[in-house]
Image (cartoon, rainbow, N blue to C red):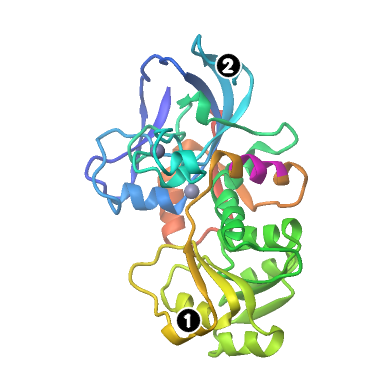
Amino acid sequence: MKAAVMHQNLDGHVDIKDVKLRPIHHGEALVKVEYCGLCHTDLHLMSGDFGTSPAGRIFGHEGVGRVIKVADDVKNLKIGDRVAIPWFFKGCGHCEYCVTGHETLCRNALNPGLNVNGAMAQECIVPADYSVKVPEGLDPVEATSLTCAGVTTYKALKVGNTKPGDWVEIVGAGGLGNLAVQYAHNVFNAHVIIVDGNPDKIKAAKDAGAEIAINYHDNHHIGKTIQDKVGGVNVSVVTAVAKEPFTEAVNALRPLGTLVAVALPKGNMELNIDRTVLDGIKVAGSLVGTRHDLAKTLQFGAEGEVKPIVHTCRLSDLNNVIDDMKASKITGRMVVDFTKEK
Ligand SMILES: [Zn+2]
Ligand SMILES: [Zn+2]
């Protein structure tokens, strides 16, 4: 079968190769991949930002496909089921985090491209217990994006304890931010403020339900503006890959507000101690979502509450797509269409 594997010297590009997968073991299923999105996390992996990776590792954690084989002991999947293949691929199942509903923090978790083969291939072996089914009503191309950006933003709003009628600030209106606006507005019934510097992305966020838009090129006191307009936000979800917006987002919070950090810029954020203590402010990190979060995320997609921006490409285009992504030339997500591969 054809697969995209990272170069051994981790120079940021991939080879399209013929790869033979091992046979499935107990508890596993074999999935024929239909679609797999290319994520910025993949670019980090193939550039060695997360450390070394064995030669020939297949990446891909925005995969969707159908089960074509199951091990004898598998009860929860059958041939023909459509499943998602996410970043949280498998946990140990028995540590403190796995048994308390925080399985994405498992110290022995498997993540595609990092320590297990992923979905940027015609076939992928998955652990059946960790497989989340994709509802039949959901477009499988859109499902790839919800499998990563969707569950990440849905979970971030949950971590922020977002309630109906709350004011939510979404910082960054890219792929993550746009979906965050949709989940905040359509699923959590919150009022949304979008902050970005790109007029096209701001417009897309307003179309998705943001009531107030702030362009940071025109406004250097975003926190104060938000305090003046709505009395501060209950939740701020930061998806911008720069550290300054994190500090500014603290200024936008109302008392008891929560900043939820999602993006991963290098460096530290400033946190005013007075404000933190006197206003009871909370800062929380949020990393993708559990199997249950993913199932809910996909269900909201199937119900039409959220719609990611996706485009398909061929597996042979992948290195060009990687270059375009690095150059920020792509709006929405590029998804490799494996249904066109022989
Ligand atoms: Zn991703
Ligand atoms: Zn664990």
Task: State the image quarter where residue 233 is shown.
Answer: bottom right
| Residue 264, image x, y percentages | 41, 62
| Residue 199, image x, y percentages | 63, 76
Residue denoted by label 2: 75
Label 2 near ligand 2 (CB < 8 Å): no
At horizontal 42% and vertical 36% (from top left) the residue drawn is: 91
At horizontal 39% and vertical 38% (from top left) the residue drawn is: 95
Q: For the residue labelled by badge 1, is the local secondary structure a helix, a strand or a loop?
A: helix
Indicate the amino acid at tag 2.
Answer: Lys
Residue denoted by label 1: 277
**Which of pointers 2 and 1 indicates the residue nearer the eye?**
1
Question: For this rendering, which residue is in front, 92 or 225?
Answer: 92
Q: Is residue 264 left or right of residue 147?
A: left
Q: Earlier in the sequence, mark 2 or mark 1?
A: 2
| Residue 151, image x, y percentages | 58, 49
Q: Which residues are magenta?
A: 294-299
Residue 112 visible? The answer is no
Magenta segment includes 297: yes
